[in-house]
Amino acid sequence: MKQDLYLVVIAGGSGTRFWPKSTSSRPKQLLSFGGSTPSKSRSLLAQTLDRFEGIVPKNGFYIATTKKLEKAIVDEKLNAHILAEPQGRNTAPCIYWAAKEVAARDPKGILLVMPADHYIAQPDKLRETIQAASDWARSNDDLITLAIRPTRPETGYGYLKVSADSVKKGGPSKVEAFVEKPNFENAKKFLDAGNYYWNGGMFVWRADVILQAFDQHMPEMKKAWNEAGGSIEKAYPLMTATSIDYGVMEKARNVVTFPLDCGWDDLGSWTSLESLADSLQIRKGSNVVNSGDLLAVESEGNIVDVSNSFVALLDVHNLIVVQTPDALLIANKDKAQDLRKIVEETKKRRPDLV
Amino acid sequence: MKQDLYLVVIAGGSGTRFWPKSTSSRPKQLLSFGGSTPSKSRSLLAQTLDRFEGIVPKNGFYIATTKKLEKAIVDEKLNAHILAEPQGRNTAPCIYWAAKEVAARDPKGILLVMPADHYIAQPDKLRETIQAASDWARSNDDLITLAIRPTRPETGYGYLKVSADSVKKGGPSKVEAFVEKPNFENAKKFLDAGNYYWNGGMFVWRADVILQAFDQHMPEMKKAWNEAGGSIEKAYPLMTATSIDYGVMEKARNVVTFPLDCGWDDLGSWTSLESLADSLQIRKGSNVVNSGDLLAVESEGNIVDVSNSFVALLDVHNLIVVQTPDALLIANKDKAQDLRKIVEETKKRRPDLV
């Protein structure tokens, strides 16, 4: 275990893609999926920390989140410092804060920045890549972003373009371009070309290197920080609410990627559970059951999450069925991406449920 | 109000056609449908009694049920004598018991026998028919069964055949035959013919006349009763477990019907709620909501009963959605008649839920 490693988990998201199970006060990172196995009965946030046990020293865990979620995260009783943002302002401000915290302890400390709500089927592979990337960061003044090898022509993610040569060579590659979410045709081209990776929002940076990049590309951050005199409450409104990709990474010239093959999935919608069903061990015959006691009669292709309830299906197909103590969702599986319609309408009628 | 009228409500049924809302310990007669209007927020059993307020004297209400259901019925706080059967033995034994009770108070008393779990849209029409039928019973030694004019070629009910002439004439008709549940072709013929009625299990009998019919067609009932010396516990196992139709009515020669047009429905399955939606005032746009706060997006033709929960539907159609604190059912509406498959399987796995 290297003493200069610090984990910074970005856990401020408030998405409702798993509504009604996920709500603004109980977002995805606080949910668990595939809970029948002990390691997966923990929240995605807890699992994110678990992956770095034995790699990052005990005192080096940070969770960046919003004040709104702070209590729920404290209740998880995780061994981590909590950076509670006065309000959500995208990723750049909280990463600046985390980098300052780490730099104060160790200016050459290495930040491993990880989203709190993704799924990783093979954490060993992630740890291997993290080891290689942090070794690189220790001896190179580069900003490292992990690059996920695409497995399908996905239009929902941004891409990292590297040179075809560097792919052949293997190992780290210099990033040639950050590519916005493509249309389907381009996504297919990227998949075939082989030198485009998914940008999964996982970073490895030496504290001094990322702070230097902030000073170069977002000088207002240092200014806000210094003006606030150490008060986060004062600094936050002065910092620019933008993503670290947009604010720093896309502008920096010293970005290097390490390719990562670890069974990564961003759990973007209820249908993600279907593609991960075997890994999560939640396949029950022809249906997927994340939670609940299912009796399926002449019913196939359904995705079910009904807490501890008994659920009986009779001749129904390709439904998403989600039950919480407060709400019940039944959706056509093909419309998983339209769940926001339901969430927006529910917000109007029953804001307490979103 | 005539002092010789006695209401006998048959409330021992334990059907599960409205599972999971109906269970063996909370059968249909204890449920309410269309509860948004005050009169319909009461259970079907309570509503059955309500229909005879002002017609039957206060002390003349009887509920025949099983010991298993006795407490639940007492909890309804209805103003009625409860005849709690040691076990369910179909309708003949409890009707014999009720007739003996009424005869002990008034040998010429008139029993109005009504199922506890049917729906009647126009109770005034029922009361009119009851008045006419009880007037007839008072002065004729006939057994009266009410005859419901068919509105569709229903294959799920038994029929009463009367002469075509008597239909033309109007008023009471002698029953020529009890006809078993027909196939669809015959049901269509019956509907077209006009001299076939549905047998809805509603009867009007003078106590002495029905007891005389029992003595003639089921003499074992009197024998059991006398041997038991007034002990229901002893009498019940000795009585024949059969229906009043099979045991007495189909054999009797003095059966007369009064036609009844009162918006009757036996609430045979969840889909009944759809045909009764307007009468029950439970139509919400393109869906039917007996209970629950529904948000329907691109969803039509569904039947929803989810207690006090919020339910969101996204692009789903023709589903039956029923939620109780213990179970959730989602069924294709076209398979409402196959609900027993679910109930049988549930009985094996979770007998506590049936």
Image (cartoon, coloured by chain):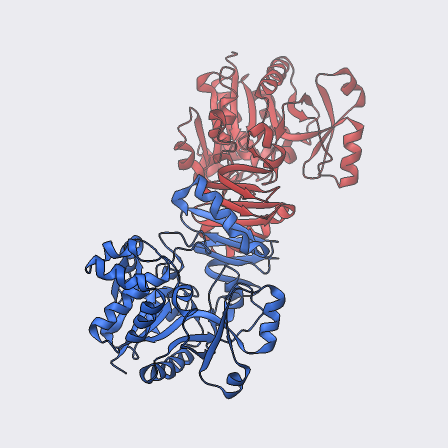
Chain colours: A blue, B red
Q: Residue A86: x and y, percent?
A: 28, 54
Q: Residue B35: x and y, percent?
A: 49, 31
Tell me if B341 is positioned left or right of A240 in this view. right
Tell me if B15 is positioned left or right of A353 in this view. right
The residue lying at 39 percent from left, 28 percent from top is: B77
Q: Residue B238: x and y, percent?
A: 52, 40
The residue lying at 63 percent from left, 23 percent from top is: B262
Q: Is residue A343 above or below residue A221?
A: above
The residue lying at 48 percent from left, 74 percent from top is: A263
Q: Residue B151: x and y, percent?
A: 71, 30
The residue lying at 23 percent from left, 54 percent from top is: A234
Tell me if B267 is positioned left or right of B36 in this view. right
Q: How many numbered circles does the render carry?
A: 0
Q: Is residue A179 above or below residue B289?
A: below
For the residue pair A105 and A65, the one nearer the viewer reads as: A105
Q: Could you say which quadrant of the image residue A105 lies in? A: bottom left
Q: Residue furthest bottom?
A: A169
The N terminus of chain A sits in image quarter: bottom left
For the residue pair A265 and B253, the one nearer the viewer reads as: A265
Q: Is residue B352 above or below residue B74?
A: below
For the residue pair A297 and A10, the one nearer the viewer reads as: A10
Q: Is residue B344 visible in this depiction of the protein?
A: no
Q: Is residue A217 visible in this depiction of the protein?
A: yes
Q: Is residue A126 above or below residue B107?
A: below
